Every structure is written in C-alpha cells, then in structure tokens.
C-alpha cells in the first residue's frame, strides 16, 4: 500500500473553500495518517524519531489549516459554520492526544542513546495546539471601520457637506 499524501504534497494547494465537506475530507486524511502511524502500517513511523517528526508535521498542517479557516471567516470569504468549527476542534483534540503521548515517550527516551532532533518542534506544536484548544475563540467576520463615538448632528451635517463638494 502506498503512503498517503496530503493534497499539497501531491502539488495541490489547500482547499479553496472551507465548507464542511472540504474540512471533513482534510480531517479524514489527517486521521488516516494518524492511524497509519499508530498501527505501524508502512515505514512512516518505523523509528521514534520518524514518529516524532511525523506528528510534528501533522500538527503543523492542522494548525495552518485552522488559521486559514479562521482567516477566511474573518475576511468574509466564507460564512462561519459551527459544524466545521466542532469538527476542527475535535480533530485538534484527537491529534493532540496522540502527539502528546509521542512527545512524552520522546522526552523519556531522549539522550538515552542519541538526541531526538525533532522533539523540541513537537513540544512546540503540542503547546500551540493545547493553547489553541484551551483558549478557543470562534472566528467572526470583521466589520468595516466605523466611528467609535456618536457624532453630533452638526458634525454629521459638516461631513455630508464636505463629501458633497468632492468631485465624482
């Protein structure tokens, strides 16, 4: 069985849309990569160091995906969907549990025979995912700039007069 590749590894870009179907496809791909590592399929996680690097890469991809989704909601490219948000939070929690277990094993085995070079990176991503989940804020569409204070009637009238004098 050939190793699974994310769309961007096949030369494709991240999804142009972040609808529920696209997000579900992304999370299913991620789950498949976790499953392959956990069951020992293929050579993806043959050594502890490969396992650490694998989970660091998966965490990075998920964090990037969540950030892009939130940015798309914020900029108004897509509407907010609570089912998509729930799916992303669930996936982040699922991945974090596997990555944290691997990081703990790496911490235990580090420097026994050699140094695990990707361990610091995995700890960083685990901390980032944990912080994101513990401090999750649902993204909202941004609103256009508006006055922070209520304008007086005279100020509004003056603004309208000046706008009327501008050339088209």
Image: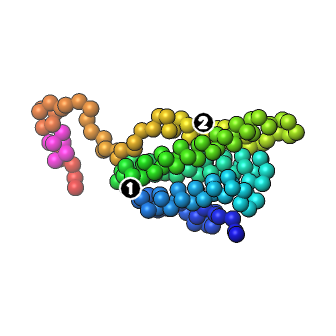
Based on the displayed image, in which of its 4 quarters is residue 126 positioned?
Answer: top right
Does residue 13 lie above or below 38 as drawn?
below
| Residue with the most extreme right position | 113
Does residue 54 lie above or below 17 as drawn?
above
Q: Residues within 10 Å of mark 1 (few under 14, many from 20)?
A: some
Q: Tell me: 62 left or right of 85.
A: right
Instruction: For the N terminus, give its image quadrant.
Output: bottom right
**Residue bearing mark 1:** 77
| Depth check, front residue: 150 or 126 | 126
User: Where does residue 32 sit, x and y in percent of width and height?
Assistant: 60, 59
Residue at (70, 37) in percent of width and height: 104
User: Where does residue 20 sit, x and y in percent of width and height?
Assistant: 42, 58
Q: Secondary structure at mark 1?
A: loop
Label 2 with label 1: CB-CB less than 8 Å: no
| Depth check, front residue: 69 or 168 | 69
Q: Secondary structure at mark 2?
A: helix
Q: Nearer the viewer, mark 2 or mark 1?
A: 2
| Residue with the most extreme bottom position | 1
Based on the displayed image, in which of its 4 quarters is residue 44 positioned?
Answer: bottom right
* Magenta residues, dominant SS class: helix
Q: Tell me: 31 left or right of 117.
A: left
Q: Which residues are magenta?
A: 159-164
For residue 82, say whether it is visible: yes
Residue at (58, 64) in percent of width and height: 7
**Residue bearing mark 2:** 127
């Amino acid at each position: 069985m050939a190793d699974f590749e994310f769309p961007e590894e096949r030369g494709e870009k991240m999804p142009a849309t972040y609808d529920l179907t696209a997000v579900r496809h992304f999370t299913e791909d991620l789950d498949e990569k976790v499953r392959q590592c956990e069951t020992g399929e293929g050579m993806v996680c043959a050594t502890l160091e490969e396992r650490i690097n694998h989970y660091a890469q998966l965490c990075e991809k998920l964090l990037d995906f969540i950030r892009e989704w939130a940015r798309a909601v914020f900029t108004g490219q897509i509407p907010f969907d609570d089912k998509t948000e729930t799916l992303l939070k669930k996936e982040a929690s699922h991945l974090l549990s596997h990555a944290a277990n691997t990081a703990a094993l790496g911490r235990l085995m580090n420097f026994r025979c050699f140094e695990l070079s990707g361990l610091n990176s995995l700890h960083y991503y685990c901390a980032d995912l944990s912080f994101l989940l513990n401090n999750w804020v649902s993204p909202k569409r941004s609103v256009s700039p508006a006055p922070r204070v209520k304008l007086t009637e005279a100020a509004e009238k003056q603004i309208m007069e000046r706008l009327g004098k501008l050339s088209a």
